[in-house]
Image (cartoon, rainbow, N blue to C red):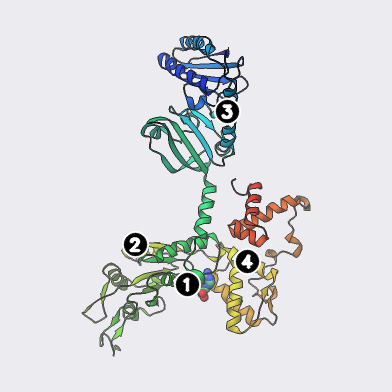
Amino acid sequence: MEGRREILRTPVSIHSQIAAHIVQKVSHISRQNNVSIFLRKINDNRLIPANSMLSMVTFFASRGEEIEVVVEGANVDNAIKEFKGFFYNELGKEKEEKTTYELLKNTSIAYEKIFNSIGSGLIVTDENGAIMIFNKAAESITGINMDQAIGKKIQEVMSDIKIADVLKTGKEEMNKKLKIGTNVVLTNITPIYTGTKIEGAVIVFYDFPQIEYLENELKRDRKLDKAFDIIIGNSGKLKDALTIASKAAETDSTVLIRGESGTGKELVANAIHYASKRKDKPFIRVNCAAIPVTLLESELFGHERGAFTGAVTQKIGKFELADGGTIFLDEIGDIPPEIQVKLLRVIQEKEFERVGGIKTIKVDVRIIAATNKDLEKAIKEGTFREDLYYRLNVIPVILPPLRERREDIPLLVEHFIEKLNKKLNKNVKKVTRKAMQALIYYDWPGNIRELENIIERCITLSDNDYIDYKDLPHYIRNESAVLSDDDIIYLGENNKLLTMEEYERKIIKAALQRYKSFNKAGKVLGLTHKTIAAKARKFGLVDR
Ligand SMILES: Nc1ncnc2c1ncn2[C@@H]1O[C@H](COP(=O)(O)OP(=O)(O)OP(=O)(O)O)[C@@H](O)[C@H]1O
């Protein structure tokens, strides 16, 4: 594309009133000559599109100041000639109003400061998509310099942000997730109207980690029904699973709880029932793996007298007992194929017949199933029906193993000490630091059930009112995992102490990682949540 530039000395101070004349004239010249015209102050890299009032309101020049005019496009020579004619002859006749000039200039500076103090990225374009405002947050989120952005078409600078539709239809686009460079951002694009004409667009975007952080904070801090209080743990992974479970409690949908043995699947099933509107009706648990296959069908559905050898009386099955309430089918991965068919029918039709019976029995039962088996693999191997799997897996709740939420171990230990002191009539008050470190380090293949058993064993065997490292079973003790008292002070490279500020940063970071909220971290460190938030921002631990 051809281009030409020339330095002109302005015959009049340029402020928004004068700028309006310029915009009007430039629009005309641009159309006639098929060019784009930009103005630039000497010593300023920003090219300001001179055909847009939105960009020109920020353009100020004193009388006699040199400004550069840049013309790009087809008929550049003629365009520059016309512009110069207008600039010197017509603008020169404009009356100077010094106070207006100062006032508008100061207002513009104030606006610029306001834009730059906003924590979210802010881009304003004119009706052609040329960038007129690009604030500091936009610079830091996109990594693009303001000088390289202003005056350019937005698609040249950030091709992922599509504003053409908004400029055409005038319909805003909200909360779109976009990737800008390596950053994921959430964008809102709104049109700027003057009357019915679309003059441009405002693009506001938030750094995604910040959004995710806030969303997670909100999600995790959402109050769960008090039925969930029996489930101890503050880790994000557990809270995420419990949030889904508590949502499930509000519905009658079938829930499939997955997780290794001892992760609390039964506890969660219980909580879902007692948080649901069925809480005053029965909660019936069936351990499908513990009942011999031959008896499982009659256990679930009941039998009529004489249905098989030994069926001397009629028996009411668990489904009938659970009528109006919830049935919890634990170890669902272990039920044999013939019972899977009958179960599928109960889920779909809510009806079945007792073993040896002909009468169809209708029930209103909410089903919660649980397993630690790989059901997908069982489907492939042909031992678990795919249609049943889909019927059960309406709301999947996945409980993390304890080794993936080690931060919950101290809380769980405290909880079990309190619970087991009562049961065993003991008065253990604490766990030594070294013992706690070993407990946190151990991988817990048996998860929380194993942790509870270990604490019970320690309390039973301990003669003291604390649990010490030497009280732990040998396979849990791990010298390399535990630190001496001095190690609480982290030494930097070459064993040097760090500055107080560096320690402060490390402590705040550790507290936020562990407690995931300013409030909780503040409580533990004896600071207000405001102080924690301010320090976290200062140390760059959260985005602004
Ligand atoms: N988050 C928790 N807070 C307190 N106690 C817990 C928690 N999770 C599990 N427990 C306790 O751990 C033990 C095992 O839990 P539960 O029986 O619910 O696990 P499960 O996943 O159903 O195990 P399995 O697959 O072997 O049946 C129980 O005594 C339960 O009370």
Task: Left or right? Give the position of 309 relative to 232.
Answer: left
Say what secondary structure mark 4 lies in.
helix
Q: CA distance from mark 4 to mark 2?
A: 37 Å
Q: CA distance from mark 2 to mark 1?
A: 23 Å
Say what secondary structure mark 3 lies in.
helix
Can residue 454 be seen in the rendering of this structure? no
Residue placed under numbered mark 2 in the picture: 390
Q: CA distance from mark 3 to mark 2?
A: 55 Å
Is the CB atom of the residue marked by disc 3 within 8 angstroms of ligand 1's nearest atom?
A: no
- Nearer the observer: mark 3 or 2; the answer is 3
Marked residue nearer the N-terminal end (2 or 1): 1
Amino acid carrying mark 3 in the image: Asp
- Nearer the observer: mark 1 or 3; the answer is 3
- The mark found on residue 500 in the picture is none
Marked residue nearer the N-terminal end (3 or 2): 3
Quarter of the C terminus within the rendering: top right
Task: Left or right? Give the position of 130 relative to 465.
Answer: left
Check the image and report above or below for 121 versus 42.
below
Residue occupying image coordinates x 55% and y 26%: 58
Residue placed under numbered mark 4 in the picture: 440
Residue placed under numbered mark 1 in the picture: 267
Amino acid carrying mark 2 in the image: Tyr
